[in-house]
Image (cartoon, grey):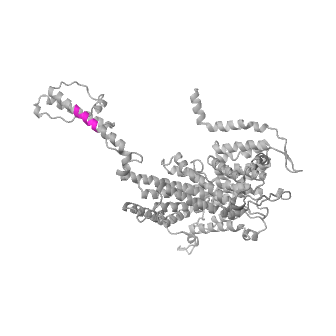
Amino acid sequence: MSLKSLQIRILRNWEFFVIIGLPLLLLPLLFIPDDEVIGVAPNTRPSTKFKCAFVLILMAIYWMVEALPLAITALLPMVLFPLLGVQDTAKVSINYMKETNMMFVGGLIIAMAVEYCNLHRRIALTVMTTVGVSPIRLMCGIMLTTSFLSMWLSNTATAAMVCPISMAVLEELFPKPDETPHGFRKRRASIFKERSEVDFEAFVDKIKKKRAQLKHQQSLPAESFRTEPRPPKKMMKQLSFKIDPEPLEPSELTRFIRERDRQKDIQFEMQMEEQNENEDEHEENNDAENNPEKIRMAKRLNLKKMLLFSILLSSNIGGTGVITGTASNLVFQELIKPVNVGQGGKYVDISFATWMAYNIPPMMVNIAFSFIYLVVMYLGVPDWVYFWRKQKSTPNSDETEALNRVARVLEEKRRLLGKTSFHESAVFALFLIIVALWLFREPKFMKGWAEHISDADIGDSTAALFVVILLFIIPRNIETFCGVGDNNGGAVLTKTPPLLDWKYVQLNLPWGVILLMGGGFALSNAVVYSGLSEWLGRQLHAVETLPLTVILVVVMFLTATLTEVASNSACVNVVIPILIALSESLNIHPLYLTLPATVTCSYAFLLPVATPTNAIVFAAGGGDISIMEMVKVCLFPNFACIIVILLFHVTYGNLIFNFNDYTYPSLASSSTPLSPLLVVNGTFLR
């Protein structure tokens, strides 16, 4: 086997070599002596932090490069922790079905019910027809719809639903030409271009006929002799292998005519060559001025990119609005629970209501900024900005007709949905009920409903699964169920199905994400149990000399970089336990670093592999969007979103969670509250 073939074989099967080679590379971690004892007597135990670090690094790299499927990598704690003596199998397995997992399942099933009855499509079409159909209004409607739906549905499902609608609208505004494929220029035929085999054969027949005519014309008088222009010399050379090289014995007149034709051919070739050179030189510059079709296709391409990037940005940003918006938000909620941020009501804790209060304002600002950025980038500054100008551009008749077509298409799509059915109304009512239950379970400004019902701690998953059960009880068609319109005395002749079908749930529920969350919880739990988090906190204590604002900025930008190459949930599972240990080591509020880092994990805009949403948008581009262009367009919004959440966090977030005054339970009796993070005029002291 040659060296080159060996290299190709390794590159084609790189996942296998990473899976086998990485554990061997990390093997020294298992043999580092560790005599530390952790825990409080009499429940002390030997530290296994380096063995846990072995699994942590292994899973983090597997997640980043996706050598194994993400869900399969999440199962490694079930195998490695018991074998390495880090935790018992029973303790590890508990992490795979926690309360947060059940809330995730409940939220997804409710979202599936919305998709199952096409309620999400009705909402999208209603918003788009209400806002308007001009390019700016159209993108505004798409971003509003996408950001709202991605708050409650999965980002992937939202993008998969909105992309086809947007592309259908684009086709009505700028239909593709039928005569030429996109990206190819239709030019006039030239004698210097190759011809088809049919053209060659026809040309050969013509030459043979001409030779026969020449033989016949040699015996005719000169006055009666006529000839056709001779074919180009280049073409004769190309066809020389096909033409019978039978020599002719031309007369003097024939030689004269051939010489004359040859001179004409040369002159004709020079003229054609000069004309083609001029066309090639000036075509790109003159296309925009002389070819309206080129202008129309350029506008179409710009609008297509603008709409697709608006879907990408609004779906990712919209998922940060509520805690059920993305799996990474729920992972954070579960990881922060052991910290006991609220300490029995002493401090404001993370809940559905506080998360919305914290994230909705920066989400709206980021959506508005992304909208303005895309409009200016692809359409230029709108005329209404220059309000002092008297003359303003007005759409021509073709543009007006295109907008009318779009309005008719959207209206037709909405008409095809028919009247709002009982199925949609019931699902929408249950959707409003679950949102209200989540908001008012623990609203902070008043006593929540959960406290009035039971002394037990009722979580959000209880409310979610209650609504899920109702989805499988309430009939889909109340008239059929009640026998309205039947001629059988109201008897139900056929079974009325419920609002949601279980087979649909089985096929569409992302079971792998549930395993991914469970693997992250198991990893985080082992990091604390093995003493690794405490050890990392001591090692990172050296950053105490840096201002907290600098630490926060570094953490957010490092997280934003990591989330571009790893899934959002995997990134949160790896980063948040380390930040929790760092926060306790520095004696700062546990949400000061962890909360903005979690939100930053959703700002993965740059690469198609970063999130499934990005991959859907990239695929919908149909080759019109390159990876490099995706990076260039989305890099500025990525930085802008990080800056916005940073500014909101240190100002507005401080009003909600009061980062300046926090004491850990273990330090409550031996230390004073934290010194302020902010002083007058917003100057940071720590």
**Residue 304 visible somewhere in the drawing:** yes
Q: Is residue 327 left or right of residue 91?
A: left
**Residue 515 visible somewhere in the drawing:** no
Number of marks drawn: 0
Q: Is residue 465 left or right of residue 241?
A: right
Q: Specify the segment rendered in magenta.
A: 262-271
Q: Is residue 293 left or right of residue 478?
A: left
Q: Position of residue 166 (x, y in %)?
A: 49, 57
Quarter containing the C terminus: bottom right
552 or 209, nearer to the observer: 552
Q: Who's the residue at 19% across and 31% down the image?
A: 260
Q: Who's the residue at 43% across and 54% down the image?
A: 299
Q: Position of residue 305 (x, y in %)?
A: 49, 53
301 or 213, nearer to the observer: 301
Magenta residues, dominant SS class: helix
Residue 529 lies in magenta, yes or no?
Answer: no
Q: Position of residue 94 (x, y in %)?
A: 75, 53
Quarter containing the N terminus: top right
Residue 263 lies in magenta, yes or no?
Answer: yes
Q: Which residue occupies the extreme bottom position in the image?
A: 489
Q: Position of residue 516 (x, y in %)?
A: 67, 50
